[in-house]
Amino acid sequence: MRSLIGAVVGALYVATPALAETPAAIVEDVQGKVDGIAFMDYVAPGKIIKLGPKATVTLSYLKSCVRETISEGVVLVGAEQSTVQLGEVKRDKVPCDTNAAQLSEREANQSAATTFRTVRSDAKGAPAKLPTIYGVAPLVQAKSGSTLVIERTDGKEPTISVPLRNETMIGGKFYDFAKAGKSLTPGGSYLAILGAKRYAFQVDASATSSPTPIVGRLLRLE
């Protein structure tokens, strides 16, 4: 079996083009012996993951919104989905917004908090849709040691201020509103504020407090 896995890994590696540094997916769950990755790691195209017997890994792709649960075998991470050998994969398309997975500080700063819905518009002059998350409890990637402030911009709501301490963050870089028992309002528009930086986003009107795939509520602020 080891020689067979080695051959598969070698074949996959040879077939892989130059590896990209941009993350393709995030690791949502790891069960059993899985080499080379851990919970909440980002993985780039070309990454090879080996799963032991009865091991599973869940990957959520940032670009395609594909969520994969993979059992055993050898995994080659792609740009939008994985190639799996000697194992099984279950794929689901989940609600997510690639623009929310990497918010643009520049775009948010071009408009005032109270007027960005009308200032930002598409080619036809209609208000542009803000980056959207599909869960009421965002998972925010930011540097520890700073303070995250969330302000609602289309209605009245108490401002949320969160000191980002290592002990309250996953892996020192993710703050999970769900884990902290905090939530936003479905349909609301918000600014995420880190020091002088501003990031605009909105919560989908159908968002609920039910468990939501990470990729659907991820806000990468760095």
Image (spheres, grey):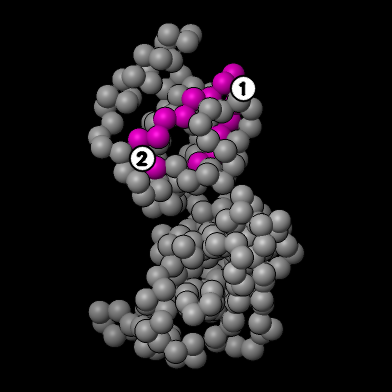
User: Is residue 56 shown to the viewer in this render?
Assistant: yes
Secondary structure state at the residue bearing disc 1? strand
For image coordinates 45% across by 24% down, the residue present is: 74
Sequence-wise, which precedes: disc 2 or disc 1? Answer: 2
Q: Is residue 72 above or below residue 131?
A: above
Secondary structure state at the residue bearing disc 2? loop
Magenta stretch bounds: 44-59
Q: Nearer the viewer, residue 98 or 15?
A: 15
What whole-number distance in Å separates the C-alpha atoms at marks 2 and 1?
24 Å
Name the spot of residue 11 as percent of width and height, x first. 31, 20
For image coordinates 42% across by 22% down, the residue present is: 85
The residue positioned farthest toward the front in the image shown = 145
The answer to whether residue 17 is left or right of residue 148 is left
Q: Amino acid at mark 2?
A: Pro
The answer to whether residue 69 is left or right of residue 103 is right
The residue positioned farthest toward the right in the image shown = 181
Q: Is residue 135 above or below residue 195?
A: above
For image coordinates 49% across by 91% down, the residue present is: 114
The answer to whether residue 94 is left or right of residue 162 is left
Q: Which residue is mark 2?
A: 45
Q: Is residue 17 above or below residue 173?
A: above
Disc nearest the viewer among 2 and 1: 2
* 10 Å crowding of disc 1: few (<14), some (14-19), many (20+): few
For image coordinates 25% across by 35% down, the residue present is: 17
Q: Which label sits on residue 54? A: 1
In which image quadrant can residue 16 be found? top left
Name the spot of residue 77 as percent of width and height, x first. 40, 36
Q: Amino acid at mark 1?
A: Lys
Residue 51 on the magenta span: yes
Q: Which label sits on residue 120? A: none
Q: Nearer the viewer, residue 221 or 181?
A: 221
Residue 117 on the magenta span: no
